[in-house]
Amino acid sequence: INRPRDSATLKELIISGEWATTSGSTPQPFLVYDNRPDSDSRVIAFANEQNLRLLARSDMWMMDGNFAMAPPKFMKLMFHKTHDNYEELFKAVLDKCRVYFLYQDPSTVILDFEQAIHQTITAVLGTEVICHGCFYHLTQASWRKIQEFGLVTIYKDSENVKLFCGLVESLALLPLEDIPAGIDYLKNAHYRWHGTLPHILRPDLRDR
């Protein structure tokens, strides 16, 4: 493959010719959107017609970013992750779908807990779309908090601490009506393990 060298800057990144289409004997357009190298916040989107048709038929959308696949200067093929950037990206994809007379109407979107993209989904797709946080991203956020509070060692050494943190995360798996009972269970576990839980994990749950 005659792959071009990696661009030193975003302004040098030009996507054209064979790099803007799919491969194979009958290349199809693949570059959906590029707000061009002179943009202060570069946004690039790739999809072929079949991808867009599948998207339009899907009632549930699942969104995630594989940072290992993104080029060095991009986050999810976006230079920034703000509400304006996400709105630009979503509208670009929707506009491309309309070229093929496709209209998306998802009822549910599963994604991480980034506030900017939640706001964008509501603004672009409508308030009736339900956003569900991804459990994987919840556990990742919990682990970052454990690291932030300096609890990594005790988390690894204490089964009680490890179990308590897991129980807090598991509240997300309960039906809404069962969450108060789940909190009561955590409160009882908190009192049982009070001597082994770090102070930071001893919240006042009496009025929850």
Image (cartoon, grey):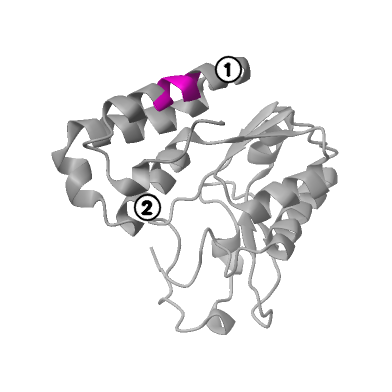
* Figure disc tally: 2
Q: Is residue 95 above or below residue 175?
A: below
Residue at 37% x, 27% y is 167
Q: Which residues are magenta?
A: 182-187
Between 149 and 134, the residue placed more toward the observer is 149
Judge left or right: residue 180 versus residue 186: right
Residue 92, magenta (yes or no)? no
The x and y percentages for residue 32 are 69, 56
Q: Which residue is mark 1?
A: 175
Within 10 Å of the Cα at label 2, are there few (<14), some (14-19), or many (20+) other Cα atoms? few
Direction left: furthest residue = 157
Residue 185: image quadrant is top left
Residue count near mark 1 (Cα–Cα under 10 Å), binned few <14, some 14–19, many ≥20: few
Dot 2 or dot 1, earlier in sequence? 2
Tag 2, which secondary structure? helix
Residue 144, labelled with which disc? 2
Question: Residue 8 in the image: x percent, y percent?
Answer: 45, 84
Q: Position of residue 139 (x, y in %)?
A: 40, 39
Which three-letter amino acid code belongs to the residue tagged 1?
Pro
User: Secondary structure of the magenta portion, mostly?
Assistant: helix
From the viewer's perspective, tell me whether residue 165 is left or right of residue 90: left
Q: CA distance from mark 2 to mark 1?
A: 25 Å
Q: Is residue 148 above or below residue 55?
A: below
Q: Is residue 130 left or right of residue 6?
A: right
User: Is 170 located above or below residue 66 in the figure?
Assistant: above
Q: Residue 101 appears in which quarter of the rendering? A: top right
207 or 8, which is in the foreground?
A: 207
Q: Quadrant of the N terminus?
A: bottom left
